Image: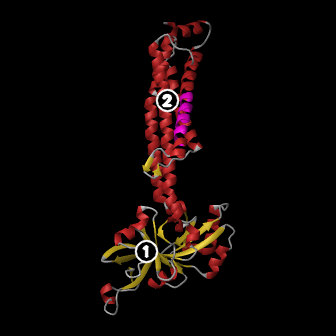
Amino acid sequence: MRSRSRQNAVNIINFITFLVIVIGSAALFIVLSGFAGLKTFSLSFSNTFDPDLKAVPAYGKTFTLTDDEAEKLRNLTGVLSLSKELEERVYLTHDQKSHVAYIKGVDSLYSETTGIDSTLYLGEWNLSGGFSVVGIGIANLLGLTVNNYRSPLIVLAPKPGKGTLSAQSLNSKPYRELTLVQSGIYAIEENLDRKYVFAGLPLVQALLEKDSRQISGLNIRLSPAADLEAERKKIRAVLGDKVLVRTRQELNSTLYRMLNTENLATYLIFTLVLIIALFNVVGAIIMMILDKLENSKTLFSLGTTIRELRRIYFLQGLIVTGVGGLAGVLLGSLLIVSQQLFGWLKITPSLPYPVEYLPINILIVLATILLLGVIASKIASSRVSKKLITS
């Protein structure tokens, strides 16, 4: 492993082979760490917006939550807080501009249950009276400002009922109207910033003609030590079959699937690059076999079997890939840690590219390198044959 060959070409090939393994394993580790950081960064939006568990109607748009059921849920050991919400699609208009979005009526515990108030971009989280909080996307589209009492936001919601709109409009307007003044503007993520207007729950229930017990969702915050599945079963036992209890991952299943698919696709692409790179290992071992042919003949004459000679070159290839993989992971680790500390690579002038250092990525890279190294070394060492040695 340490001695240099008399043939300079063999030394160059061995060095290039080792360098390719180092660069390939470092690149794979850096990409996996980058995607881990990007996944955490992307999910941080849902972690802020969504609760640990959420009860949604099993059928229809709303379900009824009685005071007795709410009290039983509050008494569960793993539950820290509950927050009721009522959501519906509405038509927003302001200053001759319009936009279709969702109004979400929430109670006073919503900010404690989800931490949504930490996303405030401007103003304050105040939903009392006729105040509301809108996304920065809606504010930009409609030209909304904070505490503008002279020009409030107008919310139009269709009236529930039967028959056509034209039949209903003979007696009255087919929609109910609500005026809201913005107390704050939040900024989370582009789609969410254009989707929601937050208002007080009683106000939205009156707008949609729902009673105080009718809600479209129940947000549940659990204690850090609580068992997610155990608490979900307890909540289902209290609320029955009228609801589905979903985790944060289930609420964002599309996002999770997209991120996992991208991560897998990237891993497979870089693994393919490593497979191509490890052809160098096959070539380097074959060159070493030819370079050390006289030594192999001497060992064979002294009693070493062909199988044992193959094992020598197999172990050599395995050591080269193993050491190269470790060196690549070390190099990649230095780059990832430096990015975490100094943020030298940035998405925007103020936002460093997110990376995450995970031990599982080290295991994945080393396992991939060693597996491919075993295959490459096995192929190359099989070139040692009795015909080659005795010729």
Residue 353: x and y in percent read 47, 48
8 vs 276: above or below: above
Indicate whether 334 appears above or below 317. Answer: below
**From this viewpoint, is residue 311 visible?**
yes
Q: Is residue 334 magenta?
A: yes
Q: Which residue is mark 2?
A: 21
Crowding near the residue tagged with mark 1, few <14, some 14–19, many ≥20 C-alpha atoms within 10 Å: some
Label annotation for residue 146: 1
Most foreground residue, 150 or 39 = 150
Q: Amino acid at mark 1?
A: Val
Q: Nearer the viewer, residue 243 or 26?
A: 26
Between 68 and 347, which is closer to the camera in this rendering?
347
Q: Quadrant of residue 333?
A: top right
Q: Residues within 10 Å of mark 2 (few under 14, many from 20)?
A: many
User: Which residue occupies 47% across, 79% down?
Assistant: 131
Q: Residue at x 59, y 13 (%)?
A: 305
Estimate the spatial distance between the alpha carbons at disc 2 and disc 1, rounded to whole Å.
Answer: 57 Å
Residue extent of the magenta highlight: 322-336
Ranked by sequence position, the earlier of labels 2 and 1 is 2
